[in-house]
Each structure stands twice: as structure tokens, then as C-alpha cells.
Image (cartoon, helix red, strand yellow):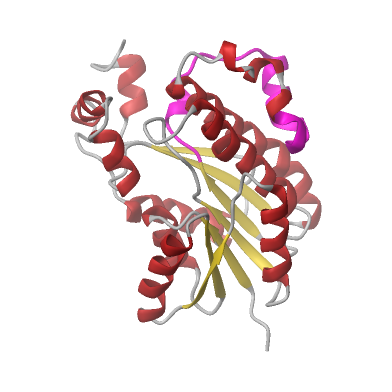
């Protein structure tokens, strides 16, 4: 008998924490561009009693995403997408950030919106960074929201000479994630499906450790020290929010973004973190 399927893209701590909350009784496909990452998460989940399988996918490659969907649909109906894939400003170039975080997320939302089960749900992991970037024009927001995924990287506002550095690229990508979720939720709603985004602050994961130990380490340490919470968050705290959004308890929530950063963004605008 076929089970409902959960697809997790991005085999990391946040994605696994969410999948553990939502994956019981379902078959979980753990997709990552590094098969060893997917296999490591699957091992942990299988040993905890979950039905999980690894699969290799590059979310910045359309054929790879379509192959993922084909494989998954042979196993059952896709009831849930958890997109936690991404690269950080200290890990990647401007081009890589745009290909993975911006285009890759848009591609997933676009393609999974065509195949998600009626009543299905999705979350994509964005970032607090998108909330700290100055506002774009309404016209620019619309372009980020509705331009077909295959044309996104050709937008004038994303031309390399207009991007200051990898942090700026990351902020643009995350702003795009939020706008795409809003626009896609309108399409998903036609089949009763829902999609939302979560914008975490500093969550203690290997990716966060790369940042903390990288060239911006002092910036990040200062950020969580001067935030109202006074500490970084955990993957399970993000999963608490995702569980609400993905479950029937969140049935009236779609097209929204949820900031979960211990108040760091509030402090950036109104507290000790003001630039």
C-alpha cells in the first residue's frame, strides 16, 4: 500500500527536526546534493523508527528536481514539502547563492505546486537576513514574486554588478523566498494546499557554526548576545513553529512568513543592534 510522501530537501539539522515532527506514518524522501549528507540523516531517522530513504538532488538544476518528483510520485502522493536547502554567505559565491537559495527555492515551489496533494502543505526555510535589507520597490517585489523561475536570474535587479557582496546576495535571495511563497500560495490555494516560509535567526547548526567561525563570526556572536533572547536558537524551536504551519492547527495560515530569531531583528531596528 502506498503511503503519503514527505519530501525534505536539504539534509541538515533544521530539516531533520521538522521531518521528525511530521514524518511518522509517511514515507520520507531526504534529498541533498551530497548523498552522504542525505544518508547520514536517513540513518538517524531509520534508527528512530521512521520510513526514510535518501536521494541525490541539486535544487538549482531543473532536471534534477523533476527527476526527484518523478521518483517520489511512484511511491505515493506528495503530501508535504520541507525545503531546508541552502548555502550561507560564508560558504558560497554570489552566483551560487542565487542559484541555490533564490532560483532553487523558486523552482521547488513552482514544480511541487503542480503535483502537491490536495490539502498538502509546505514550508521553506528563509532567513532573518531578508528582513534587515532595505525595502525594494513594489515593482521589484512583484518581479521577484511572479517571474517564472527559469527567468528569475535574468532580472535586472539581480545583475552581479548590482550586488555588493555575498551577504547582499543572501538577503536578496531570502527576500525573494518570502515573495515567492506569497505568490505561490495563491496558486496552491486552488487545490486547497498551503505554503509558508520561516525566517530563522541564528540557529545552532553546522551551517551556523561556519558563519560563527568565519569572517563574520564576531558580528553573529554580537547579534545573539544583544538580542532580547540573548542566545542562539535550536533546530527544535524552529520545528515547533513548522509543526503548527504544516499541521491542521495551521489550516488558516498560508502565504505568510514567520520570523523566529529571538528578537534579533527587533534589536536591529530598535535596540542595541541598530547600525
The residue sitting at 43% across, 71% down in the picture is 42
- Residue 15 is left or right of residue 5, and the answer is left
Identify the main secondary structure in magenta.
helix
Image spot of residue 8 (x, y percent) = 53, 60
Image spot of residue 58 (x, y percent) = 59, 51
Q: Inspect the magenta stretch and tell me whether residue 133 lies in it.
A: yes
The residue sitting at 24% across, 34% down in the picture is 212
Image spot of residue 81 (x, y percent) = 60, 58
Q: Inspect the magenta stretch and tell me whether residue 134 lies in it.
A: yes
Q: Which residue lies furthest to the right in this view?
A: 190
Q: Nearer the viewer, residue 203 or 215?
A: 215
- Residue 261 is left or right of residue 178, and the answer is left
Region in magenta: 126-152
Q: Which of 133 and 69 is in front in this view?
A: 69
Image spot of residue 65 (x, y percent) = 67, 54
**Vertical arrangement, residue 43 with respect to residue 123, above or below:** below
Callout count: 0
Does any portion of residue 149 appear in the rendered image?
A: yes
Q: In which quarter of the image is the C terminus?
A: top left
Does any portion of residue 193 appear in the rendered image?
A: no
Q: In which quarter of the image is the N terminus?
A: bottom right
Amino acid at each position: 500500500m502506498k503511503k503519503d510522501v514527505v519530501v525534505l530537501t536539504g539534509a541538515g539539522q533544521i530539516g531533520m527536526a521538522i521531518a521528525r515532527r511530521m514524518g511518522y506514518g509517511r514515507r520520507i524522501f531526504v534529498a541533498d546534493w551530497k548523498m552522504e549528507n542525505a544518508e547520514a540523516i536517513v540513518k538517524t531517522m531509520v534508527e528512530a523508527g521512521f520510513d526514510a530513504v535518501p536521494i541525490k538532488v541539486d535544487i538549482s538544476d531543473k532536471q534534477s528536481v523533476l527527476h526527484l518528483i518523478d521518483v517520489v510520485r511512484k511511491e505515493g502522493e506528495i503530501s508535504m514539502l520541507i525545503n531546508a536547502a541552502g548555502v550561507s554567505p560564508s560558504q558560497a559565491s554570489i552566483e551560487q547563492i542565487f542559484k541555490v537559495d533564490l532560483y532553487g527555492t523558486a523552482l521547488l515551489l513552482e514544480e511541487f505546486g503542480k503535483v502537491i496533494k490536495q490539502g498538502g502543505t509546505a514550508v521553506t526555510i528563509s532567513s532573518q537576513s531578508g528582513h534587515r535589507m532595505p525595502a525594494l520597490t513594489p515593482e521589484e517585489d512583484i518581479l521577484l514574486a511572479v517571474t517564472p523561475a527559469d527567468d528569475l536570474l535574468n532580472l535586472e535587479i539581480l545583475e552581479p554588478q548590482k550586488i555588493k557582496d555575498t551577504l547582499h546576495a543572501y538577503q536578496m535571495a531570502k527576500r525573494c523566498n518570502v515573495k515567492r511563497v506569497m505568490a505561490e500560495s495563491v496558486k496552491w490555494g486552488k487545490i486547497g494546499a498551503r505554503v509558508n516560509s520561516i525566517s530563522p535567526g541564528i540557529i545552532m547548526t553546522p551551517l551556523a557554526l561556519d558563519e560563527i567561525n568565519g569572517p563574520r563570526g564576531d558580528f553573529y556572536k554580537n547579534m545573539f548576545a544583544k538580542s532580547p533572547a540573548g542566545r542562539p536558537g535550536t533546530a527544535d524551536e524552529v520545528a515547533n513553529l513548522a509543526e503548527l504551519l504544516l499541521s491542521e492547527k495551521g489550516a488558516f495560515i498560508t502565504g505568510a512568513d514567520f520570523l523566529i530569531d529571538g528578537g534579533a531583528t527587533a534589536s536591529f531596528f530598535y535596540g542595541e543592534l541598530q547600525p
